[in-house]
Image (cartoon, rainbow, N blue to C red):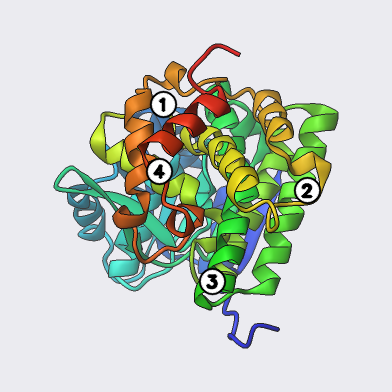
Amino acid sequence: GKCGKIHKVEFKKILIGKGVFDDLPIILKEFYGNSQFLLVGDKITTELFVNKIVNAFSLPPNTCVINGATMEEVQRVATQLFKGVIPVAIGGGSVIDVVKLASYIKNIPFVSVPTSPSHDGIISGTASILVNGKKTTQKAKPPEVALLDTVVLASAPKRLISAGYGDVLVKFTSLKDWQLSNMDTGEFYCEDSVSISDRVLEQICTSLQSSGLNVTDLAYALVNSGASMVIAGSSRPESGSEHIVSHYLDTHSPRTGLHGEQVGLLTLLISHYYVEKAPEIWWTQPSRQPEEIRRFLSLAGLPHTLAELGIQASLVIEALQNASTERPDKYTILHKFPPNKNEATDLVLKSKLFQMV
């Protein structure tokens, strides 16, 4: 790549389309011959999807039902990955993350079959796993094959679809945080990755504008977001100060909302801070200003306020003040200008994320 790093992307195939789930046995056979497969789902996706496809395999696959993205479940899946077994994750983020880490530990490939488009971890190289009740990010590898059936994804609860948009729209702030860090700290910055992510942001906003929720467009956005992270070798293009604040909220109170809802709304909050503190590096496009970001979040069907997600304003104020010490290694606008209590309070008020808009 132009940035001087070697971009290693090991995907064999990423399929996005209508009804591709029905072709899963054929596709798996094409890549892995007569390997033994382990189909992994959670309680719901096993009933809805795994059980429906099991009989379509010429060699009956093994199945495994997981309950939550914990290290215990990762170990339990790993013990079933004997030599030559290929695991297939059929589910949401938790299922994919468990299989992703289990297969990484065993140094074997895995196949990702997301059943909801709720976050960009579908093809990323990291897994979000609970260790002793604490949320951690574990290094792993992206799937070798990913299958996104737009009919399956469209059947997911609307709230999960909206959350997927939230996780894509964070690029308004995450791309600026990465640029800021590159300028201030000399952190590695990959133009290839940035241009992919920027294009994804542009396309998803155009899509929302013209057709509202569109699962096919969202599927492409999530896959390209994952590819951008793989190319960058980090989560930088898709995760900035909005994710740090969100993570602080997660660790200091029980989460009732979805990850994508939270980070989407926090993107609006951070955008106001950029306009106030660093307007010279904020986007020049009229379509990327805070009130337009609010409109895109609304078009995506996300809640209008953080209060609706059961989050206390006082905790957000605390999170903004503590973000830079929470993640000293990940430089953002909150590291360049750590807000004091008054500034954080003003920002929360200005964002209107705690009053009904």
Q: What amino acid is found at the position of numbered circle 4 in the picture?
A: Val
Q: Looking at the image, do the residues carrying marks 2 and 4 touch, with CB atoms under 8 Å apart?
A: no
Residue that numbered label 4 is attached to: 245
Q: Looking at the image, do the residues carrying marks 4 and 1 touch, with CB atoms under 8 Å apart?
A: no
Q: Using a 10 Å C-alpha cutoff, classify the residue at mark 3 as few (fewer than 14 neighbours), some (14 to 19) or many (20 or more).
A: few
Spatial distance from mark 1 to mark 2, Cα to Cα? 26 Å
Q: Looking at the image, do the residues carrying marks 3 and 4 touch, with CB atoms under 8 Å apart?
A: no
Residue nearest the viewer, comparing 280 with 213: 280
Q: Is residue 61 visible?
A: no
Specify which label sits upstream in the sequence, 2 or 4.
2
Q: Describe the element under mark 4 as helix, strand or loop.
A: helix
Residue that numbered label 1 is attached to: 257
Specify which label sits upstream in the sequence, 3 or 4.
3
Spatial distance from mark 3 to mark 1, Cα to Cα? 34 Å
Q: Describe the element under mark 2 as helix, strand or loop.
A: helix
Q: What amino acid is found at the position of numbered circle 2 in the picture?
A: Glu
Of the two numbered discs 3 and 4 in the rendering, the one whose residue sits closer to the viewer: 3
